[in-house]
Amino acid sequence: MKPLNDRQQRILDFVREYKARHGIAPGIRDIMEGVGISSTSVVVYNLKNIEKAGHLRLLGGKSRA
């Protein structure tokens, strides 16, 4: 696995904590609010890079995947 930058690590930590607390993955807007990012496209861009680095797997076409 490739290392993550600070923002990517904050997103990954938030996703893991949210899923552990709620039993489902957070939505894009949940991540935006939880990490303090102002754009959905920035969240999506970073999620794709986190996936490329091997830290999580996104399920395309599904809400909260």
Image (tube, rainbow, N blue to C red):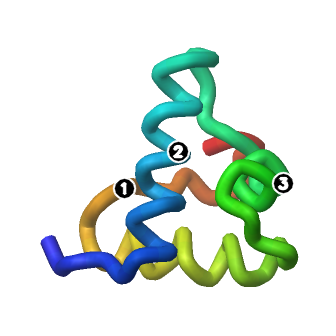
- Amino acid under disc 2: Val
Image depth: mark 1 or mark 2 in front: 2
From this view, report whether residue 60 is shown above or below residue 27. Answer: below
Q: Residue at x 44, y 55 (%)?
A: 12
- Position of the C terminus, as image quadrant, is top right
Which amino acid does the dot numbered 1 rest on? Leu
Judged left or right of residue 9, residue 17 is right
Circle 2 Cα neighbour tier, 10 Å, few/some/many (<14 / 14–19 / ≥20): many
Q: Residue furthest left?
A: 1
Q: Which residue is mark 3?
A: 29
Task: Judge by depth and name the residue closer to the eye, 21 or 50.
Answer: 21
x and y, in percent, of residue 57 in the image? 41, 55
- Closer to the chain start, of discs 3 and 1, is 3
Q: Which residue is at the front of the view, 49 or 37?
A: 37
Residue nearer the viewer, 38 or 56: 38
Disc 1 is placed on an element classified as loop
Q: What secondary structure is found at the residue carrying circle 3?
A: helix
**Which is more N-terminal, label 2 or label 1?**
2
Q: x%, y% of residue 27?
A: 75, 46
Q: In the image, residue 35 lies at what x, y percent?
A: 66, 58
Q: Which residue is mark 1?
A: 56
The residue pinned by badge 2 equals 15
Q: Can you say whether 9 is above or below 7 in the image?
A: above
Q: Answer with left or right where residue 36 lies relative to residue 50.
A: right
Marks 3 and 2 close (CB-CB < 8 Å): no
- Residue 64 at what x, y percent from top left? 70, 41
Q: CA distance from mark 3 to mark 2?
A: 12 Å
Q: Please name the amino acid that badge 3 sits on.
A: Arg
Give the structural element (helix, strand or loop) at label 2.
helix
